Image: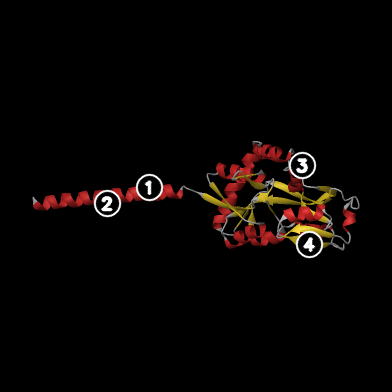
């Protein structure tokens, strides 16, 4: 009888241990379902991303929130200046970056998703500057650029033989002031951001000449298996949100037009 009692006790202990393993396994599985994506952005890039009343808003914010909701990720925004955004992406402190144009140089470092819109570049001068009316007037002039952005490269690609001096600034707010006062001649920037800043924020600049340097804008990811898996998931979400009109609707909300349409 003692032997039978001992065997029953051992069976009960084994059963309790198995239940404990099952419970901890369920917890581990549940924890793995909490998927978080860390995205680098600036707090002052209206209308792509900007903070208002403590909340991050903007075109890219709405796009990214829609994409990652579609594939079951919680978005965590990491806000710094643009130099910090690039550094965080390079060191792996963020998983991807908002409003990031695809270039050959960047494709050497990252893999990219399907583009979610196409950016174009424009030149702006002070609203009272009547001496510069076309892109040809940039010859021999100083043009401001936000440090770390791709607009300087696009400008020099468009005018490879011109005598343009690019002056890099850390923030765009100082650029607005210097260009408006004609301390510096012009500013090279993304069409979408600059149009919104002029129309909605009333910055004292105006756009001259034609837009140029179209670039696809997509989500960059590290060149590894995890990055490739995320690209596959994100591409499926972009396709769905494009087909059902969500991306177009977000574009029209922030720009009054569909910036995903390459003909505009």
Give the image's coloring scheme.
Answer: secondary structure
CA gap, disc 1 and disc 2: 14 Å
Q: Which residue is mark 3?
A: 199
Q: Are marks 1 and 4 in contact (CB under 8 Å)?
A: no
Up/down of 187 relative to 245, above or below: below
x and y, in percent, of residue 42 in the image:
64, 52
- Earlier-in-chain disc, 2 versus 3: 2
Question: How far is mark 2 from mark 3, CA to CA?
Answer: 66 Å
- Dot 1, how many residues are within 10 Å of its Cα: few (below 14), some (14-19), or many (20+)? few
Q: Earlier in the sequence, mark 3 or mark 1?
A: 1
Mark pair 1, 4: CA separation: 57 Å
Near mark 4 (Cα within 10 A), the count class, few <14, some 14-19 or many ≥20, is some
Which residue is label 2 attached to? 17
251 relative position to 165: left or right? left
Q: Going 35% across and 50% down the picture, which residue do you hit?
A: 24
Tell me if residue 144 comes above or below residue 45 in the rendering. below
Q: Residues within 10 Å of mark 3 (few under 14, many from 20)?
A: few
| Disc 4, SS | strand
Which of the pair 130/150 is nearer the observer? 130
Which of marks 3 and 4 precedes in the sequence?
Answer: 4
Image side of residue 180 versus residue 231, left or right: right
Structural crowding at the residue carrying mark 2, measured as other residues with C-alpha within 10 Å and reported as few (<14), some (14–19) or many (≥20): few
Residue hosting label 4: 167
Q: Position of residue 9 (x, y in %)?
A: 17, 50
Q: Nearer the viewer, mark 4 or mark 2?
A: 4
Tell me the number on the disc at residue 26. 1
Residue 97: percent from left, percent from top: 63, 53
């Amino acid at each position: 009888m003692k032997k039978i009692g001992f065997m029953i006790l051992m069976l009960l202990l084994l059963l309790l241990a198995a239940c404990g393993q099952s419970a901890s396994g369920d917890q581990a599985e549940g924890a793995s379902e909490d998927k978080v994506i860390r995205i680098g952005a600036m707090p002052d890039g209206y209308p792509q991303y900007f903070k208002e009343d403590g909340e991050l808003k903007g075109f890219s914010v709405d796009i990214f929130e829609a994409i990652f909701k579609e594939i079951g990720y919680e978005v965590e925004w990491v806000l710094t200046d643009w130099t910090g955004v690039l550094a965080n992406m390079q060191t792996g402190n963020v998983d991807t970056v908002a409003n990031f144009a695809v270039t050959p140089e960047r494709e050497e470092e990252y893999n990219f998703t399907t583009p979610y819109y196409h950016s174009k570049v424009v030149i702006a001068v002070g609203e009272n500057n009547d001496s510069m009316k076309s892109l040809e007037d940039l010859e021999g002039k100083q043009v401001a650029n936000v440090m770390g952005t791709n607009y300087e490269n696009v400008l020099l690609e468009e005018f490879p033989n011109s005598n343009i001096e690019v002056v890099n600034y850390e923030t765009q707010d100082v650029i607005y002031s210097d260009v408006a006062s004609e301390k510096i001649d012009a500013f090279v920037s993304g069409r979408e951001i600059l149009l919104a800043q002029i129309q909605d924020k009333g910055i004292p600049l105006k756009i001259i000449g034609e837009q140029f340097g179209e670039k696809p804008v997509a989500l960059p990811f590290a060149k590894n298996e995890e990055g490739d898996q995320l690209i596959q998931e994100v591409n499926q979400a972009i396709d769905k949100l494009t087909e059902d009109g969500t991306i177009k609707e977000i574009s029209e909300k922030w720009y009054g037009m569909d910036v995903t349409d390459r003909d505009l």
